[in-house]
Amino acid sequence: MTERKKTTIVLFSGDYDKVMAAYIIANGAAAYDHDVTIFHTFWGLNALRKDEQIETKKSFMEKMFGKMMPRGTEKMGLSKMHFAGFGPKMIKDIMKKHNVLPPKDLIEMAQEQDVKLVACTMTMELLGLQKEELLDGIEYAGVAAYLGDAQDGNVNLFI
Amino acid sequence: MTERKKTTIVLFSGDYDKVMAAYIIANGAAAYDHDVTIFHTFWGLNALRKDEQIETKKSFMEKMFGKMMPRGTEKMGLSKMHFAGFGPKMIKDIMKKHNVLPPKDLIEMAQEQDVKLVACTMTMELLGLQKEELLDGIEYAGVAAYLGDAQDGNVNLFI
Amino acid sequence: MTERKKTTIVLFSGDYDKVMAAYIIANGAAAYDHDVTIFHTFWGLNALRKDEQIETKKSFMEKMFGKMMPRGTEKMGLSKMHFAGFGPKMIKDIMKKHNVLPPKDLIEMAQEQDVKLVACTMTMELLGLQKEELLDGIEYAGVAAYLGDAQDGNVNLFI
C-alpha cells in the first residue's frame, strides 16, 4: 500500500491572480490524488468571504477592515497591472473567452474534490472576521495545525 | 547509487528582484547537482520573453497585454523601492560595481547548467504569448507536469 | 532515535505583515521541535537591522539605500492596505488589543528558541548593509548554505 502524497499551501495573498494560481495548483494536486490543504491567513482569508454582507457585532476598527477588504475573490485586484481596476476586467474577459474558470468556481471545485480549506483563527481575530462571514464547509485552525500537515507534505508552498 | 536531489520553483512574479532571487537559487541548486525546474507562470512568463518585438497574429486584447508587459527581465520593475524606475537603475549600477550577474545572464547560465525552463501553456494562452516570442530551448507544459516534478522535489518554492 | 524535522524560510520580503507571517511560522515550527532557519535576503534583511543609526563608512549609493530602507520591522509598511501608513497603525492597535506579538518580539522569541537567523552576504554587499547594523547573534552565509539546509527540509517556504 502506498501512502497518498500531500500538498499544502499557505495562502497569504489576497490578489486575484495569486488566489487563482493557488487554487489551480490545489485542484491539480487533488486530481493527482494528493491530500491537499489550503491554509488561508492574512489577506488570503478574503478568498473565503461570502459575497453578501452579513450582519455581525463588530468594533469600529473591525467594521473598517471589513469594509475595506474585498468580500470574496470577485472584488480582488491584481498583484500586477491592476490599472485602477482595468487589468482585472481585461483578465476576466480573456478568461471567459478561453473558458478558464474564475477563482470563485475554482474554490467550489476544490471543495468538491475534498481540498481542506482552513481559515487561520488568529488572523480572523485580528481582522475581525467571523465564521458567519466565511464560506460553509471550511475548517478553523492555527499555525500548529498547519505545521502538522506541512511537515509530512511533499509540496509545500507559500503564496 | 544515490538519487539526485531535486529543486522546483514556480516563478509567478515578474519583478526584477524576485526573478533574480529565483535564478540565483536555481543556479545554486544546479551547481549543487540538483535537478532543477523553473515553471514560469503568470507574470513570471515575461522573464522568458525575447527583448526584440516579434511579429505575431494577435487579438486586440492580446496586443494590449503584449505591449504593457515587459519583454524580458531588463524592462522589469522592482517589487519594492521602484521609485518610478529610479530603484532599478540604482540596483543595476550597484550590481555592475559588485560584479553581480543581471537576470539576463543568470537565465543564460541556468540554460547552460541544464536547468529545465518551462513556460505555463495555460497562462501563455491567457496573456496571448506565443512560442516565437519566448526564448529558444525552453519547454511547454501545464500544472500537471509541474506537480509531477514537485511531488518528488526536495526544495519546492513559489516565488 | 528519530531525526528532528527541519523548516527553512527564505525571507525575501520586507513587508510588516509578511515578516510577521514568517516569524509566526518559524516560532511555531521551533515549538514543534523543528530545526528552523530563516535566510534573510533582499528586503527581508531589513528585519534584522537595529533601529538606531550606526555610523559606518559607505558610498553615496549605499547611504541612499540605507536611508530609504526601514531600520527594523517597526518602520515597515504593509503588503496590502498600507494607505500611507494608516494601515500599519490600525494593525498595530488591533494587535496590541488582541495581545498578538509584534515582529520585533517575534524575532526575539525566535532567537530564544534557537531559530537560526541568517543574513545573505551577497545582498548585504548589494544594499551596502554592514554587520554592525544588524542584530547580534545572527549568522552570515550565501545561497549554498541555504540550499544545504533546505535540501533536507521538511517544510521549505519562500516568503
Image (cartoon, coloured by chain):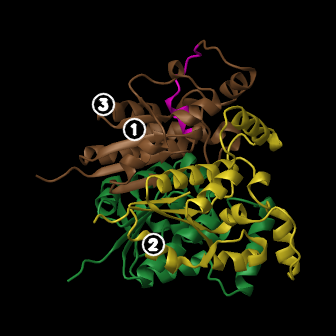
Chain colours: A yellow, B brown, C green
Disc 1 marks a residue whose amino acid type is Asn
Q: Chain of mark 1?
A: B
Q: Chain of mark 2?
A: A
Q: Position of residue B9 (x, y in %)?
A: 43, 48
Is residue C127 at all visible to an observer of this figure?
yes
Few, some or many C-alpha atoms within 10 Å of disc 2 (few <14, some 14-19, many ≥20)? some
In this rendering, position of residue A151 left or right of residue A80 = left
Is residue B90 at all visible to an observer of this figure?
no
Measuring 55% from the left and 64% from the top, which residue is drawn there? A114
Secondary element type, mark 2: helix
In this rendering, position of residue C149 left or right of residue B131 = left
Measuring 41% from the left and 33% from the top, which residue is drawn there? B107
Measuring 69% from the left and 25% from the top, which residue is drawn there? B62
Q: Which residue is mark 3?
A: B112
Few, some or many C-alpha atoms within 10 Å of disc 1 (few <14, some 14-19, many ≥20)? few
Q: Nearer the viewer, residue A25 or B94?
A: A25
Q: Nearer the viewer, residue B61 or B36?
A: B61
Q: Which residue is mark 2?
A: A149
Q: Nearer the viewer, mark 3 or mark 2?
A: 2
Q: Nearer the viewer, mark 1 or mark 2?
A: 2
Q: Where C140 sits versus B19, above or below?
A: below
